[in-house]
Image: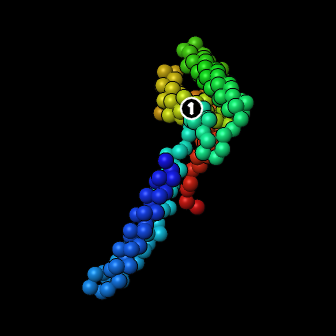
Amino acid sequence: RAGAVLAGAALIGLCVCSLAAVTQSPAWAAPMDRRAAVTAALVAPLVFSSEAHAQQAVLPGAEDDLESSAFGADPPEVVEARKKARAEGKKKQAEAKEKFRGIFADFAQDDKTIPGRIELLGKMQDMILQDAMLPIGISREDIVKGVRAVKFNIGCTKMSVKQGECKQLEKAYMKLLGTIDKVNDRQIIGGR
């Protein structure tokens, strides 16, 4: 499929180049138009080939063609080992997600004290650092919404966030978000 896209891109580039060659006389095109045509011919294969590569991208754990013979067939034991590793990976991801949800559910309980909540935020942070990612299926936005709801329910809003135990909870929450941003390579860029 990617070869067909590249062949199509090359054909389009060839057509554009031949069109530019035919239109060399000033009656057909201005010099800037010829330059634009040549530029388009040179850029077209790059654009189309990147689309082909983007279409081939596979998410972790997704079922792609494990038995592809595009670059030569792998031995059956290698294919089976890959399938087994993927199944184990999916199982580990599901376990990590359930564990994280359990910690968060404990964090959201009404009878928890603020120091207990801070400790649970630390556990979530450690888990994220250990796996170097959020569990698949849980997003940063989910955590933000959940923690905001908990903070509202316990009265840590507006000015109270800057006082007492609420201030400590806010710091722990910001550390958790910083850890998530760190493992996702999401950095704040600011002016100096």
Quarter of the image for residue 100 reads top right
Quarter of the image for residue 58 reads top right
* Location of residue 117 with respect to 174 vertically, above or below: above
Residue at 44% across, 72% down? 39
Task: List x then y, in percent, for residue 133.
Answer: 64, 35
Query: Helix or strand or loop: what does disc 1 sit on?
Result: loop
Specify few, some or many for label 1: CA neighbours under 10 Å numbering under 14, 14-19, or 20 or more: few
Q: Is residue 188 visible?
A: yes
Q: Is residue 167 visible?
A: no
Q: In what quadrant of the picture does the C terminus appear?
A: bottom right
Residue at the spot of label 1: 63
* Location of residue 116 with respect to 77 vertically, above or below: above
Quarter of the image for residue 172 reads top right
The type of residue carrying mark 1 is Glu
Task: List x then y, in percent, for residue 142.
Answer: 51, 30
Q: Is residue 29 left or right of residue 173?
A: left
Residue at 47% across, 52% down? 4
